[in-house]
Image (cartoon, helix red, strand yellow):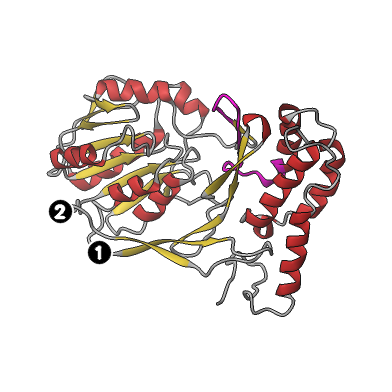
């Protein structure tokens, strides 16, 4: 079965490759030796055992070593001498965090014993959404809060929906369907997801499915599938099909930016394939990993991404993000002046399409725009 990474790097075959049996045996031997140097009993903490297990779990699961050109063996050689001296898991985690920092991967994090996440990477990009400016705008424009993380505004000829997280405990698809029914007759819609860092991609695709009138390929994925860092399953297409009793087929603008990650990038990847949809704002954050969680001593846990996700045109999402159809510059000075340039640009674009009947409060003042 053919296995490849579509990233501009070398392509290799699957288990029928000469020497793959040798690699598999070597990998199993490494796993068996993971506890070498551990002289403590099974009930006590062993930094050597925890480090070797951590390293091996990444070595056999992590999906972006080849793509990111990471020498994982060199990382082991560099960090193991210091790591094995750690007195407990709390002392070991900072060393492990330092080791994985070059991955620059938002889907690699630690879960502390109290249940909170501890990130290993924070993107440096400016995000084109400001809560204070946004809240002032929605207050002027008849915002109707649903529950945490989402709501809508009826602007006459335009409907506006903001979804702040794909969280099934808060954003119920039946409630979204009800709002779409209310806004069904509007000449255009704005879907604002700039503040959405991800969540449940099944929910995201259920929403996207209300806007497509035909089945479409919206993304491809590959999973790690073997001991080699470039062993992957074949490309698997993900498709989007129409859902619900009707589809909204009028102009839609999706607002996107650097704060969009993970399952929300799947949403952007899907929406951009629909002919009636335009994505405006900035490139997405560029982080997609489908992580698996592993446990550690002392109540700690960590995650290891295991797939590569691509857009429909085979662009790797990790580190690249998804560019908008229309780039809108929005910097700190805009928000400091109380202006949301991205939202204003979307309204101007829809105003040009729908005519003079649009009546919306500007993002920078309490006046109305016609």
Question: x, y percentage for residue 362?
Answer: 30, 27
Question: x, y percentage for residue 174?
Answer: 21, 40
Where does label 1 land, which residue? Answer: 214
**Which one is nearer the viewer's eye here, 300 or 286?**
300
- Contact, CB < 8 Å: mark 1 with mark 2? no
Pointer 1 or 2: first along the chain: 1
Task: Identify the magenta region.
Answer: 100-117
Q: Which mark is residue 246?
A: 2
102 falls in the magenta region: yes
Disc 1 element: loop
In the displayed structure, does residue 104 sit left or right of residue 115?
right
**Which one is nearer the viewer's eye here, 99 or 61?**
61
In the displayed structure, does residue 24 sit left or right of residue 300?
right
Dividing the picture into quadrants, the one containing residue 86 is top right
Point 57% across, 54% down: residue: 306
Dividing the picture into quadrants, the one containing residue 189 is top left
């Amino acid at each position: 079965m053919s296995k490849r990474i579509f990233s501009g790097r070398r392509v290799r075959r699957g288990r029928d490759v000469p020497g793959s049996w040798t690699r598999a045996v070597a990998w199993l031997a490494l796993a068996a030796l993971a506890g070498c140097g551990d002289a403590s009993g099974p009930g006590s903490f062993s930094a050597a055992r925890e480090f070797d297990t951590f390293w091996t779990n990444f070595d056999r699961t992590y999906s972006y070593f080849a793509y990111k050109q990471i020498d994982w063996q060199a990382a082991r050689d560099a960090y193991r001498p210091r790591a094995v001296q750690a007195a407990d898991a709390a002392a070991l985690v900072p060393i492990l965090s330092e080791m994985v920092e070059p991955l620059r991967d938002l889907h690699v994090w630690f879960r502390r014993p109290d249940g909170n996440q501890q990130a290993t990477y924070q993107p440096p990009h400016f995000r084109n959404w400001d809560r204070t400016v946004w809240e002032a705008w929605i207050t002027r424009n008849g915002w109707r809060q649903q529950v945490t993380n989402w709501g809508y505004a009826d602007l006459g000829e335009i409907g506006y929906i903001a979804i702040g997280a794909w969280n099934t405990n808060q954003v119920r698809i039946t409630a979204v369907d009800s709002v779409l029914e209310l806004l069904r007759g509007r000449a255009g819609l704005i879907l604002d997801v700039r503040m959405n860092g991800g969540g449940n991609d099944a929910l995201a695709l259920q929403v996207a499915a209300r806007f497509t009138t035909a089945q479409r390929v919206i993304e491809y994925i590959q999973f790690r599938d073997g001991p080699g860092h470039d062993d992957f399953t074949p490309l698997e297409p993900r498709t989007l099909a129409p859902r619900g009793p009707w589809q909204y087929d009028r102009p839609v603008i999706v607002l996107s930016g650097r704060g969009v990650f993970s399952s929300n990038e799947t949403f952007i990847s899907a929406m951009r394939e629909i002919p009636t949809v335009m994505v405006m704002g900035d490139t997405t954050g560029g982080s997609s990993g489908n992580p698996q969680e592993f446990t550690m001593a002392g109540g700690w846990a960590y995650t290891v991404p295991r797939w590569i996700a691509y857009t429909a045109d085979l662009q790797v999402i990790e580190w690249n993000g998804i560019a908008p159809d229309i780039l809108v510059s929005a910097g700190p000075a805009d928000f400091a002046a109380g202006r949301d340039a991205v939202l204003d640009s979307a309204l101007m674009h829809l105003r040009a399409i729908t005519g003079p009947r649009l009546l919306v409060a500007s993002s920078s003042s309490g006046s109305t725009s016609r």
